[in-house]
Amino acid sequence: MIELLNLLDAATREKLLEALNAAEDAKAKREVQDLRAKVTASQESPTCCDIEISNSANSPYKNLRVMYESTLLWAERFGVDTTHMPEEWQYQEGEPILIEELAPHSSLKFRREAYGNLVRYDGPRSTKFELVYDFEGTHSTPEDKRWCQADISLPNAR
């Protein structure tokens, strides 16, 4: 990328770098650093995983909705070629995690069924789970694109 930047005139290069920095700043502002998710294999079944949501803030998160579905319910994350697969077969039905209140400095664990056997999961080891919540008098919406870091501790996560 540096070589491509060197091909641009100085003014264009400066504008591009400013735009990239602004996009990075906007992304960082959408991250909710007080919340973190961890996904591990469940002992219950080879297709079940445990999702732990932790709150490190000094205040509770209320009406918290954690959207994990695009990571754990998508066929391609489990090594399935979806090229000729109908769209309705590419995703498994699932509900987001709904938490009425997550107390300060606490964690809650939920069990969810994944798209397939967790040994076949070949998605990322670290990803984002989108969030909607109420916190200290503010309400986030899906349009806010708020998210928390999710650590995926499954056998073949890359």
Image: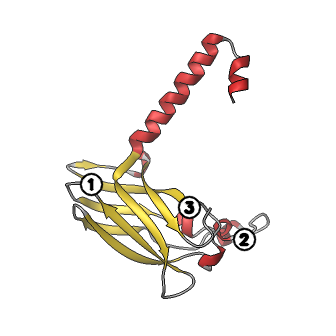
Q: Residues within 10 Å of mark 2 (few under 14, many from 20)?
A: some
Q: Residues within 10 Å of mark 1 (few under 14, many from 20)?
A: some
- The Cα–Cα distance between marks 3 and 1, rounded to whole angstroms, is 28 Å
According to the picture, the residue beneath numbered tag 3 turns out to be 125
Can you identify the residue that label 1 sits on?
134
Whether residues under marks 3 and 1 lie with C-beta atoms below 8 angstroms apart, the answer is: no
In this rendering, the answer to whether 139 lies above or below 52 is above
Q: Nearer the viewer, residue 24 or 138?
A: 24
Residue located at (54% from left, 26% from top): 19
Q: Position of residue 3 (x, y in %)?
A: 73, 25
Amino acid of disc 1 = Asp
Measure the C-alpha gap from mark 2 to mark 3. Answer: 18 Å
Q: Position of residue 37 (x, y in %)?
A: 41, 63
Mark 3 or mark 1: name the one nearer the start of the chain: 3
Frontmost of labels 2 and 3 is 3
With respect to residue 14, does 60 lie above or below?
A: below
- Quickly name the residue at label 2: 80
Taking 114 as reference, is 33 above or below it? above
Query: 85 and 50: which one is in front?
Result: 50
In this rendering, position of residue 156 left or right of residue 50: right
Q: Which image quarter: residue 97?
A: bottom left
Q: Horizontal and vertical percent for residue 123?
A: 62, 63
> SS of the residue at dot 3?
loop
Q: Is residue 1 left or right of residue 46?
A: right
* Amino acid tagged 2: Val
Give the residue displayed 60% in from the left and 66% down from the top: 157
Display coloring = secondary structure
Q: Are marks 2 and 3 in contact (CB under 8 Å)?
A: no
Residue positioned 57% across, 70% down in the render: 73
Quarter of the image where the C terminus is located? bottom right
Q: Which of the two discs, 1 and 2, labels the residue nearer the N terminus?
A: 2
